[in-house]
Image (cartoon, rainbow, N blue to C red):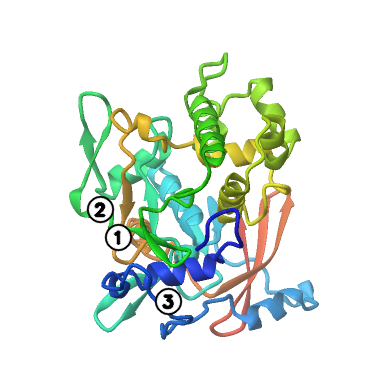
Amino acid sequence: MRRPEKPLLTRRGFLRLLAAGGGLSLCAVRPSFPRTFDIPGEIHNPSPVAGHLLRGQQSWASFPSVEGKPFDAVVIGGGISGLSAAWKLERAGVDRVLLLELEEELGGNSISGVQGSEAFPWAAHYINIPPQEADCIHELLLDLGVIKGYDLQGRPEVAEECLLRWPHERLAIDGEWVEGLDPFVGVSEREMETLRLFEDDMLGWTLYRGRDGRRAFAMPLAYSTREERVRELDAITMEGYLRSRGWRSEGLDWLVDYACRDDYGGLSSQVSAWAGIHYWACRFYDHRLWDEYPPDTLTWVEGNAFLARGLADRLKPGRCRTGCLVLRVEIDGAGLLIRFIDLKNGRQHAIRSRT
């Protein structure tokens, strides 16, 4: 990684350096960094067979008639969102729930693998301790045994084994090791002042509450204030917001672009200011708030597959069907008509759901 005013290391290169951190810790102050690392890997993508079936022409007349009794609810997709929905429906007393998942394994982006005897995450691998208003997440983590209770200040008490043990981190910048993960080390005082102004601004948004008493940027999103001043941020880009504040800094631009790519897959010139600020202000990242809001992170050896399996295990037997490609959902007077193909045997199915 290089200082912001120079060409920056790519995200891939940055992750390679972090992945090799244990072995590189014994290197000299000005090491000769290897260009590549012999780290095996795989890419897990949805089946192309399913993709071609979805794209191809289907004769709905060839599908069998509706089978069995109608379900009370059908959930399409077995990632964390779908599993959470099915779990919540069951807890609410909904009797006949069915979850249909395209892949052979539940979890979506929260699946894991095994290397030897060690489990590892393929994708999503941590969550932050949810803010107080995220009552739905608290309910889930309580049921999974991650949150054990609350202290006198109402802060969650978390199972020790679920807390991330922060490693000693450092960046390789201009051929030198720099402690921590601060890409602004060694930049000009003007750049640092711009960063401080940005951090102060994000802190202000973190603490801001609208006239309705809601936080400006909450999780879940629906809990955020609907105050017009905040909603208007959705009409400009994050880049436009930075410029409106008079901030022109290569380092800050890089940092904000990185955040926008990380969460939204786009640059600050493509992401709205509302979404961009939400990245920084929805959680209590600022170190000045850590005494009141500890910035703890939850993680597991298998990553967020821990959550997926915990949710799936709490569903009644037979609730989940994997390897099912949903082709069509129709609304009619009787509720929903759902047509899907079981990819394991190629059979076509038609079922009904009330919701």
Q: Is residue 4 above or below residue 14?
A: above
Whichever of callouts 1 and 2 sits on the residue coming sooner in the sequence is 2
Q: Which mark is residue 33?
A: 3
Q: What's the residue at 63%, 43% (across, down)?
A: 249
Q: Are marks 1 and 2 in contact (CB under 8 Å)?
A: yes
Density class for disc 3 (Cα within 10 Å; few <14, some 14-19, many ≥20) is few
Q: Which mark is residue 90?
A: none
The three-letter amino acid code for the residue at tag 1 is: Trp
Whichever of callouts 2 and 3 sits on the residue coming sooner in the sequence is 3
Q: Which mark is residue 162?
A: 2
Name the spot of residue 79 as percent of width and height, x first. Answer: 49, 60
Please tell me whether mark 2 or mark 3 is closer to you in this view: 3
Whichever of callouts 1 and 3 sits on the residue coming sooner in the sequence is 3
Seen in the image, is 123 located left or right of residue 138? right
The three-letter amino acid code for the residue at tag 2 is: Cys
Between the residue at mark 2 and the residue at mark 3, the CA separation in whole angstroms equals 34 Å
Badge 2 marks a residue whose secondary structure is helix
- Inspect this view and state whether residue 304 appears: no
Q: What's the residue at 36%, 30% (across, down)?
A: 289
Between the residue at mark 1 and the residue at mark 3, the CA separation in whole angstroms equals 30 Å
Residue farthest to the top, as pictured:
211
Q: What's the residue at 39%, 50% (across, down)?
A: 127
Badge 3 marks a residue whose secondary structure is loop
Q: Which mark is residue 300?
A: 1
Seen in the image, is 272 located left or right of residue 316? right
Quarter of the rendering containing residue 320: bottom left
Foreground pick, 54 / 287? 287
Q: What's the residue at 20%, 24% (across, down)?
A: 152
Foreground pick, 24 / 263? 24
Name the spot of residue 348 as percent of width and height, x first. Answer: 64, 77
Seen in the image, is 282 located left or right of residue 303? right
Density class for disc 2 (Cα within 10 Å; few <14, some 14-19, many ≥20) is some
